[in-house]
Image: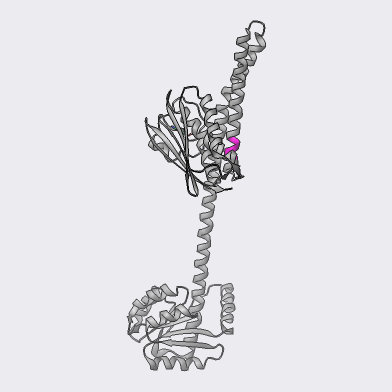
Amino acid sequence: MSILPVFSSPDRIHKWEQSTEKMLASPVKILLIEDDLAQARLLQEILKDAKEKTFTLVHVQRLQEAISKLNSNYFDVVLLDLTLPDSHGLASLGPLNEYAPSIPIVVLTNTNDERLALEAVRQGAQDYLVKRQVNLDSLVRSLSYAIERKQNAENLRKSHENLAVQVKQQKEDLVKALEVNQLRAELVSMISHDFRNPLTTILLSTGLLEDHEQKLTNEQKIRQYQRIRGAIKDLTGLLDEILLVGKAEAGKLSCELVALALEPFCRKLVEELQLASNNNQELFFSSSGELNTGLWDKQLLKHILFNLLSNAIKYSPEGGLITLRLERKEEWLLIRVSDQGMGIPEADLQGLFEPFHRGENVDSIPGTGLGLAIVKNCVEVHGGTIQVSSKLGMGSTFKIMLPFREI
Ligand code: ADP
């Protein structure tokens, strides 16, 4: 007895005929798992009479032997007796399906085993044959249909898999697009907000100078010019940050290494920031190990150190202590920027390096939320990593590891 496929359309019948023809062309490789030698011989004899196609049959008596054969050989179909010395009934199907999931299985049963045979089909066997009723016709037809049906199932599984991959990819693209949109929306809101203040300052000061030129003292005029210059500087800084973040987000930030004596480079930067700090914070610089023999991207380093030190100054109280420490650790450079400032709330730590993220405790301290996103991008482009630890009201430490590339 065999289960025949039901064909509903001429197209499907045509496809089936095509692939069956293909199968007819090359010998069909069968793995027969049967402990009854007489039965095995009988099947072999029956198959010898096949005219339209050829069969090659490998016979094993145990499930374990079958598995090792499947590991090392290719078969088109497995003929499986359900009563084996080392496995009984449906228990044989699991291991076979596991070792050769794409090979169809036709189960051989005894006359009174129909229920078991149907259960085998439910559990993944393609067909079953009752041993005593097997003849050339039924055997060839069952094997052919089993191979065909399994092939169809495999094709279906593969197209499902492809579909799942496509859906996953589309989901990722969508999330990315949403993120880009989100970034764009935040950028627009930031531009309209943060550009307004310096522009208003420029407008007011130039208006004052224009309308009251005669009345203003020299000192008053100088103050207005200073305000204008300050506002332009703020605008330029803002523009630079936006451009840099845009470039980094587009993956267009590059790392151009040049020989650089790190120690004097950092010392100079700290001195400049010390002069710019108007709340009298104290900046300390220290270093250990040979630091002046490396290759660095000057611009990236400047962005990293400038942003971290400026933040340390901005978020520290008057007179607060700020340290920049460089340490050579064999192939790595460890940079540590610490302050004793207001600290970062724990809830903010996770998204801290995302563009526009600002801590909930910043109150009216000005900022764009772009500095740390820039720092992170620069660190990563330089092949390094960044970590932050912070305690509210106690201070923060940013730790960066960069690969030390010798000249
Ligand atoms: P900005 O300082 O312009 O807001 P950043 O991207 O540089 O943007 O920093 C993001 C947020 O991280 C800041 O708004 C602040 O909440 C927090 N932060 C960064 N550095 C420090 C620091 N040294 N001390 C306390 N908070 C900090």
| Number of marks present in the image shown | 0
Tell whether 178 sits left or right of 208: left
Above/below status of 245 relative to 39: above
Q: Is residue 138 visible?
A: no
Taking the spot 53% from the left edge, 54% from the top edge, the residue there is 169
Q: Which residues are magenta?
A: 242-246
Q: Is residue 399 visible?
A: yes
Q: Quadrant of the N terminus?
A: bottom left
Task: Tell me residue 341's x, y (percent).
Answer: 41, 29
Taking the spot 51% from the left edge, 77% from the top edge, the residue there is 148
Q: Nearer the viewer, residue 168 or 258?
A: 258
Task: Tell me residue 65's x, y (percent).
Answer: 40, 83
Taking the spot 44% from the left edge, 33% from the top edge, the residue there is 359
Q: Nearer the viewer, residue 67 or 306?
A: 306
Task: Tell me if residue 244 is in the magenta stretch.
Answer: yes
Q: Residue furthest front?
A: 290
Taking the spot 55% from the left edge, 50% from the top edge, the residue there is 173
Above/below status of 204 relative to 114: above
Above/below status of 126 relative to 376: below
Task: Tell me if residue 84 is in the magenta stretch.
Answer: no
